[in-house]
Image: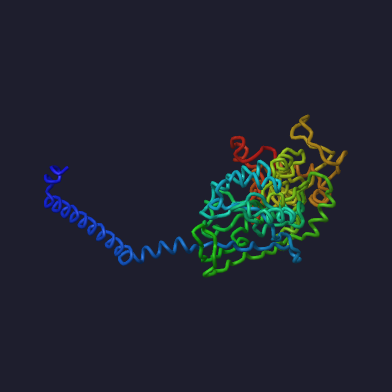
Amino acid sequence: MAVLESLKDHTKEGNTFLSRALVAFVIVCILLGVLIGRLYYLQVVEYDHQAALSDDNRIQLQPVAPTRGLIYDRNGILLADNRPSYSVTIMKEEVEDLEEVLTELQKLIPVTERQLKTFRKRLKQRRRPYETVPLRFRLTPEEIAKIGVNYYRLPGVQVEADLIRYYPYGASLVHALGYVGRINEKELKRVDPTNYSATHYIGKLGIEKFYEPLLHGTVGHHKVETNARGRVMRVLERTDPIPGKDIVLNLDIRLQQATEKLLGERRASVVAIDPKTGGILALVSTPGYDPNMFVTGISQKNYTALRESDDLPLFNRALRGQYPPGSTIKPVVAMSVIDSGIVSPSHTVWDPGFMTLSKGGRRYRDWKRGGHGRVGLSMALYQSCDVWFYDVANRAGVDVMSSYLDKFGFGQVTSLDLPEALPGILPSREWKNAPAGVHGFRGLT
């Protein structure tokens, strides 16, 4: 051992240690300089940018949905209202095991497989983080209480109140008013995404769809402070939403209901129009359906029942049914043949109860068996004599009648604020020669 100790060079070892310590000190100084430089860069040079990022993490701008405008009839009777509804929602960011939470909720309240499927679809379509997604709507007080006492074991679950559309007269006005429903991706692409950032419902049919820009209103905003988990701590600023405008229709609900009562269970339609203004006083298509089923989403069972019903309740007979006009066009036909000089006002025909275009040809019957005898213009109109109109129509030809009927609006859509209306069919030479299906079904005028 004494020999080994004598061989050690303590001076050399000291120099080696000193050089290594110096290198380590230099490295530490360099790293400390880098750290100080980085700190200076972030705290001084990048202060404004980093402060903005910090505020973005801490402060969020949350949209606030406007209240939808109400709809009244001509007498001030409320036809479309907004009512509070409670729904159970889930915020994904606060849930560790989503499937476990869904299972626990199913033990507390009824949740169908279709509702689960729709929930997962909405979860993927969320517009922003920390946005709650509805699982089930229209909770009962008992269901709200069950969820409330179990909040402690349901992270991310909330019961939220929302105003949803309610139609107090149900099926009575569905074919005129239409209804609102949950907004989908296709509809979001054709509206202002900012103004609809907090909106869950949009007009789907009828008046609700046509006047959507008026009824919707303007979105508001709340500038809120949030914690690291995204939960709102306090509201810093408020910009209140502007409610949608209320609208008053020409419809008269009392006349509407009286008309429905007269029709009973028949498959029919009636439209009553104010001759002075052209406003629609009643628009009835029976049978109808309850639009309230569609607001928060109709079940597959109920929708299938409506779609497969022999009564076709989803079909709007008043706006989309293309029916022969019958004798209502006779005054226009009479005016067309007299105004164009085809016949004179004193023109008469002999009505034996039928008319033939050629001797021994097909008989076109009059509505009155045995006929009306000698018929002039006045009798043709007040007796609605078919043979007189057969005769003058044959003399005039299709071009004259088509021209005059077009001037009176036949074959046109005249309902200005009912977007589902189909035009009538106005026969003409062009219509006759067009390929089948271009101008609608042949034989309907």
Residue 125 in the image: state x and y as whole percent: 54, 48
In-front residue for pair 417/362: 417
Q: Does residue 178 appear anywhere in the picture?
A: no
Count of marks placed on residues: 0
Residue at (76% x, 57% y) in the render: 168
As drawn, 405 above or below 70: above
Residue 279 in the image: above or below residue 268: below
Is residue 383 in sight in this rendering?
Answer: yes
Give the image location of residue 357, x and y in percent: 74, 35
Q: In the drawing, does residue 338 fall left or right of residue 230?
A: right
Q: Nearer the viewer, residue 393 or 305?
A: 305
Q: Position of residue 39 (x, y in %)?
A: 31, 63
How far across and down, in percent of the image, does residue 225 sit?
Answer: 51, 65
379 w.r.t. 37: above or below? above
Q: Nearer the viewer, residue 15 or 423?
A: 15
Closer to us: 204 or 280: 204
